[in-house]
Image (cartoon, grey):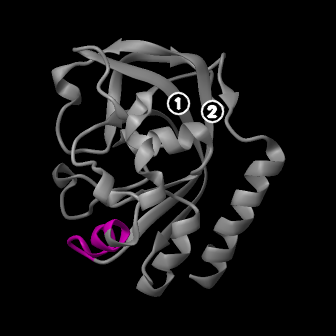
Amino acid sequence: MQSQNRIALKEWGAVCAALEEGTQSVIVRKGGIHEGEAGFRVEHGEFWMFPTRFHQGAEQLQSEKSDLLNQPLAQEPDSGKLNLGLYSVVEAVLELKDPSLLSCLQSLQVLNEATIQQRFEYRKPGLFVLLVRVYRMDHPLEVDQESRYAGCHSWVELSRDYSTDDLKPVLDVEQFLTVKQAFQEITARA
């Protein structure tokens, strides 16, 4: 893991909350509207999670996961601030092109089937599924929100590097290996 980093990935606050509590260890991406025809690309192997609140709603989550919207990462922080406390290291990437495998993702993440299907079909069929090892800080940093962070794009370069020294893994090694095995089963079928 890098000792410091300034790259962040924008993701729904509810998904960040699921990553923080260890109920999710994959990130399902299609891309923001400002990413052009090529869409999302895995440009970075490590990044801070940048929780967003735009476009997320209980109707897009699995019904038993709608309470994630009440978690701090899914809520608006103080005006003009961003909570930076989750860090992800990409362990594997799957570019999923087979729609018959979408249902396999249900046990690995919190979005409902309709939302996953909608993301899959947007523009050009397909999705990126990133298996990530997630780390967290005991006390998230409060970072100033800057206007240049706004917009529908996935990657953000923060104004400065932030140290990763005090991060702790969300899942222990054994728990993460269980998730990794489930991810590898999907990869083998793709």
For label 1, the residue is 86
> Is tag 1's residue or tag 2's residue first in the polypeptide sequence?
1
**Local secondary structure at mark 1:** strand
Residue drawn at (32%, 59%) of the image? 60
- Spot occupied by residue 91 in the image (x, y as percentages of width and height): 64, 52
Q: Main secondary structure of the magenta part?
A: helix
The residues colored magenta run 115-124
Q: Nearer the viewer, residue 148 or 56?
A: 56
Q: Name the quadrant of the N terminus.
A: top right
Q: Which mark is residue 135?
A: 2
Side (left or right) of 4 relative to 8: right
Q: Residue furthest right?
A: 174
Query: Cβ–Cβ below 8 Å for labels 1 and 2?
Result: yes
Q: Quarter-wise, where is residue 29 in the image?
A: bottom left
Determine the image quadrant of residue 159.
top left
Task: Say which amino acid is labelled 1.
Answer: Leu
Residue 45 in view, yes or no: no
Q: How many marks?
A: 2
The image shows residue 137 at horizontal and vertical percentages of 59, 21
Query: How many C-alpha atoms fall within 10 Å of the one at disc 1: few (<14), some, or many (≥20)?
Result: many
Query: Which numbered circle lies on residue 143?
Result: none
Q: Is residue 106 magenta?
A: no
Q: Report the residue at 23% width, 52% height from top.
A: 32
At label 2, counting other C-alpha atoms closer than 10 Å, the crowd grade (few under 14, some 14-19, many 20 or more) is many
Left or right: residue 160 versus residue 80 is right
Q: Is residue 178 left or right of residue 77?
A: right
Quarter holding the C terminus? Answer: bottom right
Residue beneath the point at 18% across and 32% down:
150
Residue 100 lies, with reference to residue 51, above or below; the image says below
Residue 24 can be seen in this image: yes
